[in-house]
Amino acid sequence: MIKQLAKQMLQRSGYALVRTPPLPRGAPRATQGLQVEMIAPSGAGKTTLYRQLTFSGEWMCGEHIQIGRDAFPELPEGDEGELYAKLLFGCLRGLEALPLSSGHKLRLMDYATTTLRHDIAWRQRHYPRGMISEEGICHNFAAPLAALAGETPEPPGLAELLAGRALIRLEISAERVMTHLASRHRERPGGGNDWLGHLGEEAALAHIEQELAWGLAIQRLFARHARPVLTLKAEDDLATQQARINAFLASLVPNAHASTNDTPAPVRATGTSSTP
């Protein structure tokens, strides 16, 4: 009775109670559960592509993971936890340098922190299935991750941070991204991801070129650690991109996507997203 009254009081106060799912029995270790992350400059059309792709039922999409705040674990101990902290601190320092309003920075900070917590939680909760995410640490923490990749000697724990990860990089020109940003600016001027409106044309172009460089650095980092990488060309049609991703997933988990080897998965057309 007391527990039920407490729940009702919390719900009336605006708190959502989230029932976290139990850990499946027989789940593999976190390093055996593969995370496939997509990376591309902001405005390249990565989110739009992600929404249009269809994946085998063996995989979870990052957007479908629901984790309550009480399920967020602490940072891992040791070198890996230290690197997670460096990623977050590096991201916040870069965010502070952007010419955005304090409220906008606060929303982006919450978004980045939640992304990092989801990443840690997924790996520590040992989900048995693979996960495909277009908002993983490789994209949202590209700058500090690229900085870590350039350190000599390589910081301890980096191999553990990359363990179980695979990368899909969308290859695109800065000019093509600027065209996308101009379209976004016309459709939703002043929106959360209107980088052209917030930064101006010159600063937006410089930031895109920097993001392209970060993406290449992260791709080389994955290659250095023998982690799987797929490069997609932005100019390819959706069916070609879907077929290449299907083949890539099949190579990661033999026989898990046998049905996609002969016939590409059907393509579902959807709208764009306003994710930052």
Image (cartoon, helix red, strand yellow):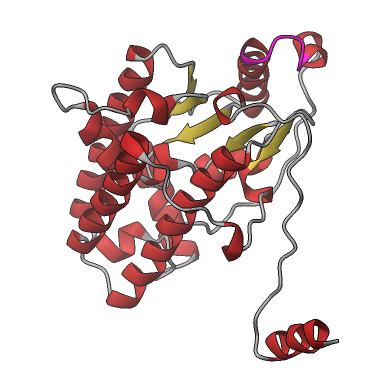
Residue drawn at point x = 36 percent, y = 42 percent = 81
Locate the N terminus and report the quarter of the image it occupies: bottom right
The answer to whether residue 225 is above or below residue 77 is above
Residue closest to the eye, 66 or 175: 66
Q: Which residues are magenta?
A: 252-257
Residue drawn at point x = 55 percent, y = 47 percent = 121
Instruction: Specify whether 138 is left or right of 148.
Output: right
Query: Where's residue 57, x and y in %?
Result: 79, 31
The answer to whether residue 90 is above or below residue 106 is above
Instruction: Specify whether 195 is left or right of 44.
Output: left
In the displayed image of the protein, which residue is found farthest to the left? 152
Would you say residue 155 is visible in this rendering? yes
Magenta span contains residue 254: yes
Instruction: Specify whether 162 is left or right of 36.
Output: left
In the displayed image of the protein, which residue is found farthest to the front? 2
Query: Where's residue 73, x and y in %?
Result: 52, 53
Which is the main secondary structure of the residues drawn in magenta?
loop
The answer to whether residue 220 is above or below residue 170 is above
Would you say residue 171 is visible in this rendering? no
Residue drawn at point x = 67 percent, y = 26 percent = 28
Task: Please count the marks in the image.
Answer: 0
